[in-house]
């Protein structure tokens, strides 16, 4: 399946840009308000995919939103909704942004699709302002080792220790914890009132800061 086929398949599964789920609409503003600089700072969604992260932040008041992805299928949609879009290959390309430009970078479920994440991390560090924050989400191998490769595009698993080591090797200070909502908790809706419940799932979130 080529990239276009994969994107279309994800769209059929409810991952199109106009189908943002409640978790993203609640979680992304929470992460932004908790970890990002002020809303006037530019934010990059690296590996924007269908745009659920970036569009949730735009709706919550972040107006300087940028998106980057290897595919440009939704470029027109993103730009109509306030996201400045560029395309390229994060495994090999230099991002088309100046050094120290972004106050924050978000990247949900990208790094596990990269055979080599070195350029990806180096570019995140380069484009972040001193003191800027990157938030990366990826499956936790120790919780998903039985299901990780059900997605045929997954190529590189991480656990909390390995992704923290990768951040340290690139000069980023990180905190890594579980992410997402456990199935039973999700049904109750309590996570919308108790944000800490958003950090109980089978994924993990790496919150990495570029030294000031």
Image (tube, grey):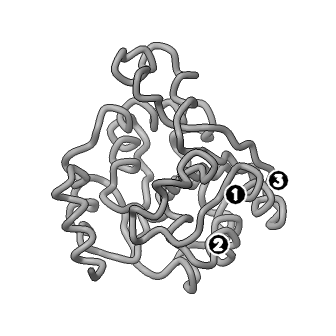
How many numbered marks are there?
3
Q: Nearer the viewer, residue 207 or 200?
A: 200
Task: Tell me what residue is drawn at x 65 percent, y 48 percent.
Answer: 206
Q: Which residue is mark 1?
A: 129
Task: Tell me what residue is drawn at x 55 percent, y 85 percent.
Answer: 93
Residue 21 x %, y %: 28, 38
**Residue 121 falls in which quadrant of the image?**
bottom right
- Find out whether the residues at labels 2 and 3 contact each other: C-beta distance under 8 Å: no
| Residue 211, numbered circle | 3
**3 vs 1, front mark:** 3
Q: Name the secondary structure under disc 2.
A: helix
Q: Disc 2 versus disc 3: distance between alpha carbons? A: 15 Å
Task: Tell me what residue is drawn at x 61 percent, y 72 percent.
Answer: 120
Instruction: Classify 156 as above or below 82.
Output: below
Q: Which residue is mark 2?
A: 123
Q: Is residue 194 left or right of residue 161?
A: left
Q: Nearer the viewer, residue 65 or 145?
A: 145
Q: Name the N-terminal-most of marks 1 and 2.
A: 2
Q: Nearer the viewer, residue 69 or 84?
A: 69
Task: Tell me what residue is drawn at x 83 percent, y 66 percent.
Answer: 169
Residue lying farthest to the left in this orientation: 12
Q: Name the secondary structure under disc 1.
A: strand
Q: Would you call the spot at circle 3 few (<14 residues within 10 Å), some (14-19), or many (20 or more)?
A: some
Q: Name the secondary structure under disc 3.
A: loop
């Amino acid at each position: 399946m080529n990239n276009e086929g994969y994107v279309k398949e994800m769209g059929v599964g409810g991952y199109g840009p106009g189908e943002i789920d409640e978790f993203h609409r609640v979680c992304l503003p929470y992460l932004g308000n908790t970890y990002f600089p002020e809303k006037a700072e530019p934010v990059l969604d690296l590996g924007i995919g269908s745009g659920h992260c970036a569009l949730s932040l735009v709706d919550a008041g972040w107006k300087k939103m940028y998106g980057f992805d290897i595919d440009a299928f939704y470029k027109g949609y993103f730009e109509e909704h306030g996201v400045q879009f560029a395309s390229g290959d994060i495994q090999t390309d230099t991002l088309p942004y100046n050094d120290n430009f972004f106050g924050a970078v978000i990247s949900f479920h990208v790094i596990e699709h990269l055979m080599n994440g070195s350029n990806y991390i180096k570019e995140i560090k380069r484009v972040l302002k001193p003191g800027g924050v990157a938030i990366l989400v990826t499956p936790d191998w120790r919780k998903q080792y039985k299901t990780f490769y059900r997605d045929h595009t997954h190529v590189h698993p991480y656990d909390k220790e390995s992704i923290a080591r990768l951040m340290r090797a690139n000069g980023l200070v990180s905190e890594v914890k579980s992410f997402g909502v456990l199935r039973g908790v999700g049904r109750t809706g309590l996570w919308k009132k108790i944000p800490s419940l958003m950090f109980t799932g089978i994924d993990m979130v790496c919150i990495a800061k570029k030294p000031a």
